[in-house]
Amino acid sequence: MYSEKVMDHFNNPRNVGEIENASGVGTVGNAKCGDIMRMYLDIDDNGIIQDCKFKTFGCGAAVATSSMATELVKGKTVQEALQVTNKAVMEALDGLPPVKVHCSLLAEEAIHAALWDYAEKHNIKIEGLEKPVNDISEKEEDVEEDY
Ligand code: FES
């Protein structure tokens, strides 16, 4: 049911933890399943993501997708990090079962929430970044129709 990569990231999640004095922190949840994810970004003066850590109170797919998402955004610019969509995370994990697709949205939205926090703190605007939602289940229905 799950790919080897999903199992690997679930059993050995990368970048679990917190970043003290993070440049941006984002927390999102899904009211339907009750899962919560928090993402921390350390962004340098050139707008490069030097470090990324996460904490997830959620299902196995949420753990695996957040772990992969942190790996994908590290070393990227803020703009490039916006390309790390839930689809990109799922592809990097060799897919997720359809009922678990919504879990990958948490990872994408948590990154966006952390970037939003960073932009607000630094008084900048990140092109293409929309204000994130706190409860991802509001967005879910639109997404699930695509799969
Ligand atoms: Fe809620 Fe996976 S079941 S994020």
Image (cartoon, helix red, strand yellow):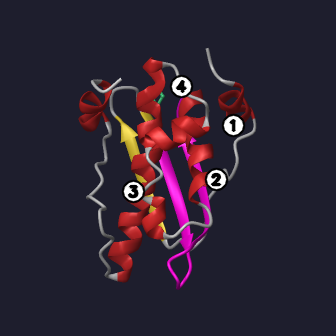
Q: Which numbered circle lies on residue 112?
A: 3
Q: Residues within 10 Å of mark 2 (few under 14, many from 20)?
A: some
Q: Could you say where residue 94 lies in the image, as x and y percent from the top left?
A: 61, 30
Q: Which residue is mark 1?
A: 9
Q: Could you say where residue 138 lies in the image, as x and y percent from the top left?
A: 24, 36
Q: Earlier in the sequence, mark 2 or mark 4?
A: 2
The residue positioned 43% from the left and 47% from the top of the image is 85
The N terminus - image quarter: top right
Q: Earlier in the sequence, mark 1 or mark 3?
A: 1
Q: Secondary structure at mark 2?
A: helix
Instruction: Kindly report the distance in space between the C-alpha atoms of the residues bearing marks 2 and 1.
Output: 10 Å
Specify whether 142 is left or right of 20. Answer: left
The residue positioned 50% from the left and 43% from the top of the image is 88
The C terminus - image quarter: top left
Q: Which residues are magenta?
A: 37-59
Q: Is residue 55 magenta?
A: yes
